Amino acid sequence: MNEIRKFIDNISPLNNSDWNFFSSKLKKVKFDKNTTVLESGKIETKLSFISKGIIRLYIPKEETDLTFGFLFENEFVTAYDSLLTQSPSEYQIETLTETILWQISNKDLQEVYKRTNNGNIIGRKMAENMYLIKSKRELSLLSKTAEERYLDLFFDSPKLLQQIPLKYIASYIGVTPQALSRIRKRIT
Amino acid sequence: MNEIRKFIDNISPLNNSDWNFFSSKLKKVKFDKNTTVLESGKIETKLSFISKGIIRLYIPKEETDLTFGFLFENEFVTAYDSLLTQSPSEYQIETLTETILWQISNKDLQEVYKRTNNGNIIGRKMAENMYLIKSKRELSLLSKTAEERYLDLFFDSPKLLQQIPLKYIASYIGVTPQALSRIRKRIT
DNA sequence: CGCCGAGTTGAACTGAATCAAGAAACGTGG
DNA sequence: CCACGTTTCTTGATTCAGTTCAACTCGGCG
């Protein structure tokens, strides 16, 4: 839980009473490897902090599904679109390794926004942060080649990448597994 | 100004005193056609509401620049990344037609967040909204063909499209003007 | 009138998709 | 702990959407 407070304080510091309120709402949950945390079509009701494990966010498709991100230890994960709009999630969330999450329900999160001093600020900063991530991604998709995107990802989390099957990375980068296999070959 | 209040009330209603505070900060500015509103490299200091006109958001590049969006009447426009991080903007903002903006400075906007009841909520909802837009765009770039993206755009704002040079639309869709010209030919 | 940028069209080229088949890694049951 | 089957990864051949380079047309404007 310590890590969670650190993460949040980094966004906007919480006083102890606010933190106590927030943390009292958190529930620890454990998931096996390759387990669905949120099924696409369901409405997202939780915000989760990854205490341990790796998570993939994707849209399941007939043939190959579309991967939108990998989340690691000490990051938050949620089907944010669905959480915000409270409509069925296109996205599905799945563990790639054994995973431990701390979860707060959307209901409780809204309470935090209302009841605590900094709740709304944190909510705003979180949304702003999510925006900045997507904005970067848009730029990457528009202006970079698949190879550059692979190298970026490799640069960001080299070790973690080794734990993720190539086909998922390919899907995140926006190419087929075959294409990524060739890119890899080319650059080594 | 009426339109601005309508827009904001749609996000989260403001009481009169909050609105008065906010609207007192707005300044009306007029721009000619093809005029730079924000130069890339400068820090964004304003949030602008488009009262009249069409605006293009892009990153200037040596050869062809990258277009990230078109904004129309009764929408907000800003180099949001730069506004949030207060670092130099990669993005440049330019009018495509004669344009009238209502602008509020970032400084005043922060005051609105602080001083008014709903300021933070609006700030949050605005960020959430910006996120949702980018999220949609990411999906479009990852899963759709250039042709599909063109049709989407056409479907969203058919009339407005006619006022935007093809080369900018091509850049938004992520192809060369030649390619878009052929797509157009193909689908008519 | 002549020029210039925008748009169209053509031809050659390229990166990635698709189809297909084989090799390697992985896990599950005997 | 090995054997088998399934899934993942690699490699090859073909196809395709889009790029690049280039030439030509059109419309507006000095």
Image: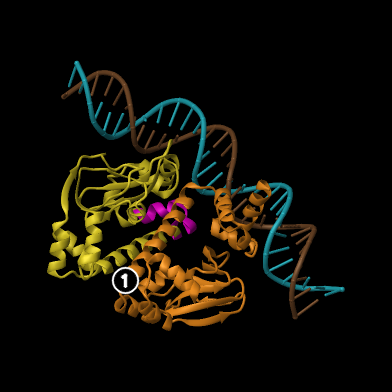
Chain colours: A yellow, B orange, C cyan, D brown
Most foreground residue, D10 or A119: A119
Tell me which amino acid carries mark 1: Asn
**What's the residue at 47%, 79% (across, down)?**
B103
Most foreground residue, A11 or D22: A11
**Where residue B22 sits in the image (x, y, percent)?**
39, 79
Task: Characterize the local packing of mark 1: few (<14), some (14-19) or many (20 or more) Cα atoms within 10 angstroms.
Answer: many
Residue A114 in the image: above or below residue D4: below
Q: How many circles with numbers are drawn on the protein?
A: 1
What residue did someone put label 1 on? B120
**What's the residue at 58%, 49% (across, down)?**
B147
Q: Chain of mark 1?
A: B
Q: Is residue A16 left or right of residue A176?
A: left
Judge whether residue A165 can be spotted in this image: yes
Q: Is residue A104 left or right of residue B149?
A: left
Residue B165 in the image: above or below residue A175: below
**What's the residue at 38%, 54% (across, down)?**
A151
Say if the magenta span includes residue B28: no
**Where residue B68 sits in the image (x, y, percent)?**
50, 63
Q: Is residue B51 left or right of residue D3?
A: right
Residue A157, by quadrant, is bottom left
Residue C25 in the image: above or below residue B134: above
Which span of residues is magenta-colored? A139-153
Q: Is residue C7 left or right of residue C23?
A: right
Most foreground residue, D6 or A3: A3
Query: What secondary structure is marked by label 1?
Result: helix
